[in-house]
Amino acid sequence: MRRVRIQRDLPVRMPDGVTLLADRYEPVGAGRAPVILIRSPYGRRGLFGLVYGRGFAWHGFQVLIQSCRGGFGSGGLLDPLGDEHDDGLATIAWMREQTWYGGSFAMFGPSYLGYTQWAVAPDAGPELRAMATQITASQFRDAAYVGGAFALESTLSWTTLTDSMSRRFGGTAALTAPRVTRRAVLSGRPMAELDLAAAGRPLRFYRDLLAHHADPAPYWTKRDFSPRVGEVEAAVTMLGGWYDVFLPWQLKDYLALREAGRRPYLTIGPWYHIDARHGRASMNEALAWFRAHLLGDFSGLREQPVRLYVTGAEQWREYPDWPVPGVRPQRWHLRPGFGLGPAEPPESEPDRFRYHPEHPTPVIGGPVLLTDSRPRDQRRLEARRDVLVYSSPPLESDVEAIGPVSAELFVRSSTPYVDVVVRVCDVHPDGRSMNVCEGVRRLGPDTLVDVREVLVELWPVGHRFRRGHRIRVHVAAGAYPTIARNPGTGRPIGDGGPMVPADVEVFHSPDRPSAVVLPLCAPRG
């Protein structure tokens, strides 16, 4: 382990005159070693400096950790997601001019730190040899407007967090932001005022997200880097979690690289976004990746590029690609009497429930940005009249699902403005009903049809339903406060005013066969 020398508060001037500050970690005696560039809105000292700065420098790499504009001494105002392309490229240009720069670099970081990598990667040039991204994606738009709805708790908690971190006592923000957010969303105040309830003042990014929900394209054009993922030539390794809010879009980035002929590595564990358990794996995989692509030492890389943890089986597996080979989609149909199974449904009347946005259907667990998102027992939710619950008989053998999950439902609603929430659960022999994955689709007016066929994309899975367990599916019209309530009126989500209940029918008949589509594969072990 090398001794480390640190240079603090290096000024990096941006083209608009704003100065950003960076710390450089230098392994003593390593000369002009390759650089690991990390750009963060969460500061560059404390754990970031210890784990990332010293952590990589101890292994012979130089590390440059920069604070994004608007925080921790860097000038300007934080415009979340908006400045990272230009600021990142200006930082790389500055780095190339330094006497300690040796001609090659990599980038590292989770969440927003991963987004800053995607922001510059297509334009960073051939000196960018490698990227290690964790629990992140090249665009955050679809996570904020998940299924066309609005990810209320995640967006409000993050904007509250970043606001608090830019002020005094920001070091406790990660602990307080989820709590004050939960208090705000349960306060009964209108959506447009929830930032006041959480942070005590207007939060620009939160209000921008509300304002651009109906027409996101103009606002997100310069903040969405997904169209250019295939242009990235650096070697990319990705780490995600089955319960992370960004997983579906991280996997789309993986597929974009594969379609462009690249060979990224992918690891998905039983983790959620702020799960401390993925920290060690992130560092270990990044070190092996950087040694391979910056130093030419490939001895630490695994043979297969895809490594997945299969929940239920509690096993790590390695595969040549994602989706994994040999998967076959199978429809599990909703059936009369609230049954579930692969067989086609018989003629039957639809099931019905009423959703009232004044008293929105709550959520228990599921992917949220700043909370523990591990599976939880859903029985309290299943007792509600506004949640339809369909269950299979006890399984006669193990059923293993690895890959994308979707639902194809036939739905009629008394108001065209309604959400369709679908959740898949694993019911244990003792009665516990544990959520495995979920998804939402927000519907608008459609005057051409009475009964609508609705496609809902759920979170991907890697899960074994064991013999004797049952597969269960929920259908609802709300998941509050993970998803903002749908007022049923079609008005912009930030507007107040009256709300309209929705009487929802879900069909399961031969001509309208509602189903969940599971990616089945032969169980191992």
Image (cartoon, rainbow, N blue to C red):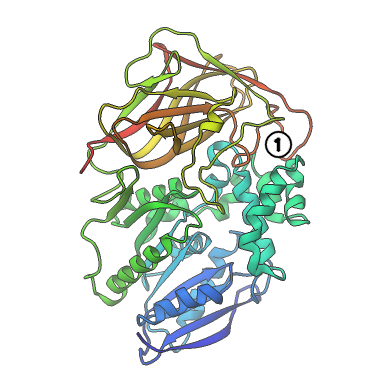
Q: Nearer the viewer, residue 474 or 502?
A: 474
Q: Position of residue 333 (x, y in %)?
A: 38, 21
x 59%, y 19%: residue: 353
x 59%, y 26%: residue: 384
x 45%, y 50%: residue: 227
Q: Is residue 186 left or right of residue 84?
A: right
The residue at the far front in this view is 430
x 35%, y 61%: residue: 236
Q: Is residue 79 visible?
A: no
Q: Is residue 104 visible?
A: yes
Q: Position of residue 375 (x, y in %)?
A: 46, 43
Q: Nearer the viewer, residue 504 or 410?
A: 504
Q: Position of residue 370 (x, y in %)?
A: 57, 54
Compared with 128, 13 (above or below) is: below
Judging by the rendered image, the residue that carries numbered circle 1 is 492
Q: Position of residue 274 (x, y in %)?
A: 51, 57
Residue 106, picture quadrant: bottom left
Residue 61, picture quadrant: bottom left
Compared with 259, 401 (above or below) is: above
Compared with 510, 496 (above or below) is: below
Quadrant into which the N terminus falls = bottom left
Give the class, few, some or many, for how many residues have Cα within 10 Å of label 1's Cα (few <14, many ≥20). few
Q: Report the amino acid beneath label 1.
A: Pro
Q: Is residue 324 left or right of residue 491?
A: left
Residue 66, picture quadrant: bottom right
Determine the secondary structure under disc 1: loop
